[in-house]
């Protein structure tokens, strides 16, 4: 057997909810009407948050902001499966994840105003602060999963990152270590086809991001990232596997960044309108609505009610945020170490 | 000659060096079609489609690939999108770029430029405001350059590209579009390892670089200050500094970076060693706080404000 | 109480902290069965099989995983096999470990120790002799500790492990087996941010740390020198230093690292700022050369030799 | 098609020369008798060099040294296919590669004595100095390949590294970039089953190192690394592919580190004698000899002659090395930059 095949790998893609609102019943996860409505309402809330953040930015009331438009199914569908005790390590474009986990909305506005206090996660949540250096937080999720395993906790951890994040060395080192120690961690890649101006094909020559997992000895799967049920199912399965001690999973959510990279970007410089148009038909909310309508769970009136409620809520959160006191100068020093250093004590007096 | 800002001046330097020398190539994230997040490379990929390369999101890879290109004989100019992301390249810069000449006893060299926007000033997200130039100054084999104006940005970048050794070229984001200046169309090189006396004076030598130079210039009214723009931080121009200090006998050093082990420490230690007898007052460093750089809302309280500089100037005069 | 060397003292500290606190875990390359390339962790995996983890060859991964462990509530002690390989972790240390407390306004912290052998002395291959402590001192949010003896290695490491913030713990390879000393079996902590007066004196304050401390002690015969072992470099003990300088009026700082932006610059600048009037002579730094660290054959000519230290002592006395 | 397979990957293993000296004729590369004898003689030279280096170390005449025993087929077989104009980027355990390419033996001794002058590659060779930080030189090979492509040269580049090296972030970043730009580079992993004390199974959970290539969109192949013909063929094919503009290849040479990690290591602390014994039967030289004997190319007398010649040669190279002048102190400063800095000029006077 001179030239033998010693390993065979198959990369799967999962899809449940189609653009026309049909679902594949054989794969459809068990979701109550209540779950569906919650998901829908989270969708409206996430979009409302996103639009308002963009508006506040335009008015000079918020800093640089990264829109999640188009990626809500990937974020809500996956975060919906997480327990509050699970450790979540987001990148910077995961406001839908924060919102699904119940993070205070006003604090998210606070954060995007350039205020660290917005990232002081409430005690009952275990979501980590935004990681700005792309891809570098994947090892943190691995370390937390390692800690949970050492302590014998049933906690799982999740790292969120983009297609760009998959190119960083830390992605590689983190996933490889997770594979070796079979850690309870899931890696959720939102492949939104762009890393600022770099299209997915130039990010890596691999056909899928999912297949990178096999280089670390565990499974990767691609899901339609605009299909909230596929995302939900893949994440739920991966979490169950993690909790059962069967190791990590990489989930590639195949989706699209509908907006500019951030408010500092102008995507028209590098991508065509047609490209974006194509994806409008694949809107993740639209197909959820079609499905719910068929099930008698969606009416225009219901949507209007939800929208009104959510708008009022976000209004009040913005007020809450804008009414909060400015951060204090001394906090620049106060949070460097647990205790002030000899020098910091003197510096404090100069502020 | 046209009045242009620093973004345009850097763009011009890149274009002219690329026209002149086919070995100059650019790599980095979004440097192609997008023209870079600050538009530094705008229009260049259209002119040099075969010599400008958008890379995957991989800073260590960018630096490492640039090292390999340089060793082969190209003169790569790599862009790191913000200085906060250069930490991923430290191994490539410190363990390779800086040592290839020494390691191979001159057979291989590393004529590489790593450009990166640096410093506070645009109220961006976390890690977009770093000014850790001192780290790179501590590594022999690397040169560190910080321009302070459109004019010197062009001339210094041209020298950096032509330099036979690796140069870390730190571009103060605050200055990118703040100042316009007459910049000659013709190419010109400003030598490295040479400081610039921005203004002569006889009472105090004030040393700064990059964006703090401008804050210094706003603060010296009423003082007879000699202002030095260091421009090349490593290796730095010992002679120009000493000559000035011997004349004035008083020194204030201003930088944005945190105080502890900042580049001001090196300058202060050096001057005190070499010119102690000439000093009429202790050397004062005016620096960023000993703390993690805050996000936008507190950003203005981190770096030295004008008042702090004025206070230091008064202090050395009244000593 | 037994006479043991630094390797044994560090091993003892690790063992005792692991016995006392189930949250202390070790990770790194070869730290398990092999006991680490310097045998620091010898015998520990047998005692704590579930808390010592050999990792793949991935320094940034090691540091990043340790950050995640620390954020979860463990107290990881990560070993980087040689300081020359810590450059790969700089992004994890500077962009994460040092900022997690600040970034989350105290909700998450990073009680992590990164241990690494450091400095010249064993004539190894390239990049096994680094002493770039100054880099880490320049980053707020990190503490930097360098032991100089078996006794203080144990006490300082215990403090580092118990510290609520990240500590880079640099172990001078030259000292690992050079000195034996009485080290108590009982656990004891030597507080961080406190320097140690090794020997009192009234003419010159000599400041050193790690292996250079011993070279200093060999060089001071005939001088009435007060020798300070800094132990914690960041944050450093300003008070002890100033008190000594106010007494002696002369300062020599000795370190192995390259001169430019070395930690000696910070000390010199600080002392001159705060105690200028007390100085009878310029502060002198005795340091490594401004050059890439050479390999074994030239290694001895890089770091300050005894003669250079003596010359500096004479210089400040004769000034 | 709700759950579909979107990518299939097969990892191959190549073997040509068996332990008994038989070859698979259908795969056997075209090698003249002269080539075979050259390979054999390089084997003897590499082993002789290795043994002498260990001996010199034991006598205190050489610094820490990393033995190549057992890995000669991987090194000689691959380097034999390289042109002198190709750019080669070795790690620290590649003395067989240097030797095959004709690097002066005395300079290798000089290098391992801790003398940079030993790494001043002669002008007619293009082998890069030893890279000590494991895995970090892979991007250099990628950059050189990029440069060759930009300049339109037919040059290929090769990076050598170990199983341990495959875990480093730079491996990932380098290979990914090579895939995106389809660069003329080959990655040669000598999987010798150990990274100091870490066995291969704990280095990565992936079944093979070869399969990692598919995560970067190009092919990886495993070869029996103790089979010089398989190594030769795989490398030659990969080089042809590279020169044809068809992109990179990862070659995993499955071999074994027979000696301690380095002279500073004691492998008995972490691996059993039996493990090593097993691999003795797979000695790469033995099977080459059996093959050549069958072809009438090997006799004991021939081997004795070669050994004698090689021993004398290595003797004289050691003499040459030991007779060379010590390096000069000023060279510490002289090679930092092209020109001395203001400060260095003053420091020079203090030496
Ligand atoms: C290490 C690092 N390099 C560069 C940047 C600048 N940057 C911010 S987002 C981004 C692209 C990220 O792409 P991807 O990972 O696909 O996430 P997406 O923006 O698409 O959500 C870049 C280059 C950064 N934040 N971190
Ligand atoms: C980045 C880095 N980390 C750690 C080391 C110390 N070290 C030297 S060799 C080695 C193991 C290398 O294993 P592998 O890549 O399989 O190569 P091999 O030694 O088996 O040839 C280690 C950990 C190093 N040289 N570089
Ligand atoms: Mg993306
Ligand atoms: Mg190996």
Image: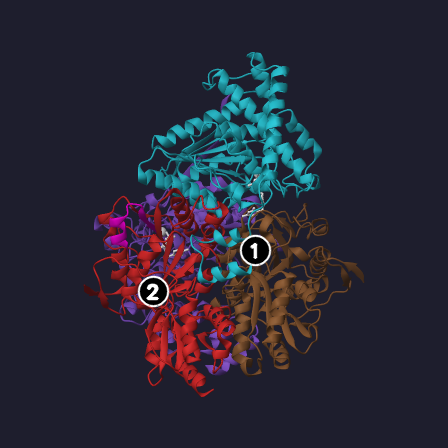
Chain colours: A cyan, B brown, C red, D purple
Q: Bounds of the magenta span?
A: C14-28
Q: In which quarter of the image is residue A158?
A: top left
Q: According to the image, label 1 marks what residue?
A: B130
The chain carrying label 1 is B
Residue C181: which disc? none
Vertical placement of D98 versus D201: above or below? below
For ligand 2, which image quadrant applies?
bottom left
Residue D169 is situated, as x and y percent measured from the top left of the image, at: 46, 49
Q: Position of residue A277 (x, y in %)?
A: 68, 29
The N terminus of chain B lies in which quarter of the figure?
Answer: bottom right
Residue marked by disc 2 = C147
Front-most of D195 and D52?
D195
Q: Can residue D3 be seen in this view?
A: yes
Helix, strand, or loop for circle 2?
A: loop
Of A226 and A101, the residue lying toward us: A101
Q: Is residue D5 visible?
A: no
């Amino acid at each position: 057997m001179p030239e033998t095949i010693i390993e065979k790998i198959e990369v799967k893609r999962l899809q449940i909810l189609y653009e026309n609102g049909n679902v594949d019943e054989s794969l459809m996860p068990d979701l109550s009407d209540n779950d569906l409505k919650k998901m829908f309402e989270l969708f409206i809330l996430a979009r409302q948050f996103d639009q308002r953040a963009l508006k506040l930015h335009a008015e000079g009331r918020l800093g640089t902001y990264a829109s999640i438009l188009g990626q809500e199914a990937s974020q809500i569908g996956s975060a919906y499966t997480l327990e509050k005790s699970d450790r979540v390590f987001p990148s910077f474009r995961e406001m839908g994840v924060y919102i699904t986990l119940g993070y205070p909305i006003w604090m998210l506005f606070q954060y995007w105003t350039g205020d660290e206090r917005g990232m002081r996660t409430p005690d009952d949540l275990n979501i980590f602060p935004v990681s700005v250096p792309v891809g570098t937080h994947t090892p943190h999720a691995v370390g937390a999963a390692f800690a949970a395993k050492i302590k014998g906790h049933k906690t799982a951890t999740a790292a969120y990152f983009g297609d760009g994040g998959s190119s960083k060395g830390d992605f590689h080192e983190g996933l490889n270590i997770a594979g070796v120690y079979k850690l309870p961690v899931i890696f959720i890649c939102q492949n939104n086809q762009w890393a600022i101006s770099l299209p997915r094909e130039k990010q890596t020559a691999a056909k899928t991001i999912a297949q990178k997992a096999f280089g670390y000895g565990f499974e990767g799967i691609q899901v339609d990232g605009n299909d909230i049920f596929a995302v939900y199912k893949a994440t739920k399965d991966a979490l169950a596997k993690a909790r059962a001690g069967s190791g990590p999973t990489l989930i590639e959510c195949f989706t699209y960044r509908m907006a500019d990279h951030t408010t500092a970007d102008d995507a028209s410089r590098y991508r065509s309108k047609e490209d974006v148009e194509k994806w409008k038909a694949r809107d993740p909310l639209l197909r959820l609505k079609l499905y719910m309508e068929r099930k008698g769970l969606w009416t225009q009136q219901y949507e209007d009610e939800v929208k009104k409620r959510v708008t009022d809520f976000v209004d009040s959160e913005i007020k809450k945020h804008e009414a909060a006191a400015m951060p204090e100068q001394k906090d620049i020093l106060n949070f460097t170490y647990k205790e002030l250093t000899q020098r910091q004590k003197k510096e404090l007096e100069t502020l | 000659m046209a009045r242009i800002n620093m973004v345009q001046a850097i763009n011009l330097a890149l274009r002219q060096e690329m026209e002149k020398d086919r070995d100059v190539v650019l790599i980095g994230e979004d440097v192609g079609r997008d023209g870079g997040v600050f538009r530094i490379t705008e229009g260049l990929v259209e002119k040099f489609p075969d010599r400008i390369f958008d890379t995957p999101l991989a800073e260590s890879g960018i630096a490492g690939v640039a090292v390999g290109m340089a060793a082969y004989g190209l003169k790569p100019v790599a862009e790191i999108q913000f200085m906060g992301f250069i930490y991923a390249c430290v191994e490539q810069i410190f363990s390779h770029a800086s040592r290839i000449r020494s390691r191979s006893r001159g057979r291989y060299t590393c004529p590489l430029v790593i450009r990166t926007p640096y410093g506070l000033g645009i109220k961006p997200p976390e890690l977009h405001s770093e000014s850790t130039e001192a780290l790179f100054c501590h590594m022999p084999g690397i040169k560190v350059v910080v321009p302070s104006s459109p004019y010197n940005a062009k001339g210094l970048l041209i020298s950096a590209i032509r330099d036979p050794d690796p140069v870390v070229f730190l571009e103060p984001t605050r200055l990118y579009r703040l100042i316009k200046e007459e910049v000659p169309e013709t190419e010109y090189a400003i030598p490295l390892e040479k400081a610039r006396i921005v203004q002569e004076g006889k009472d105090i030598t004030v040393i700064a670089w990059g964006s703090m130079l401008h804050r210094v210039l706003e603060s010296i009214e009423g003082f007879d200050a000699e202002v030095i723009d260091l421009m090349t931080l490593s290796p730095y121009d010992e002679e120009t500094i000493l000559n000035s200090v011997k004349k004035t006998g008083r020194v204030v050093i201003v930088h944005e970076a945190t105080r502890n082990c900042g580049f001001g420490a090196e300058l202060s230690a050096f001057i005190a060693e070499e010119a102690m007898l000439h000093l009429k007052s202790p050397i004062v460093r005016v620096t960023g706080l000993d703390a993690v750089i805050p996000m936008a809302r507190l950003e203005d309280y981190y770096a030295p404000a004008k008042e702090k500089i004025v206070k230091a100037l008064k202090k050395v005069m009244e000593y």
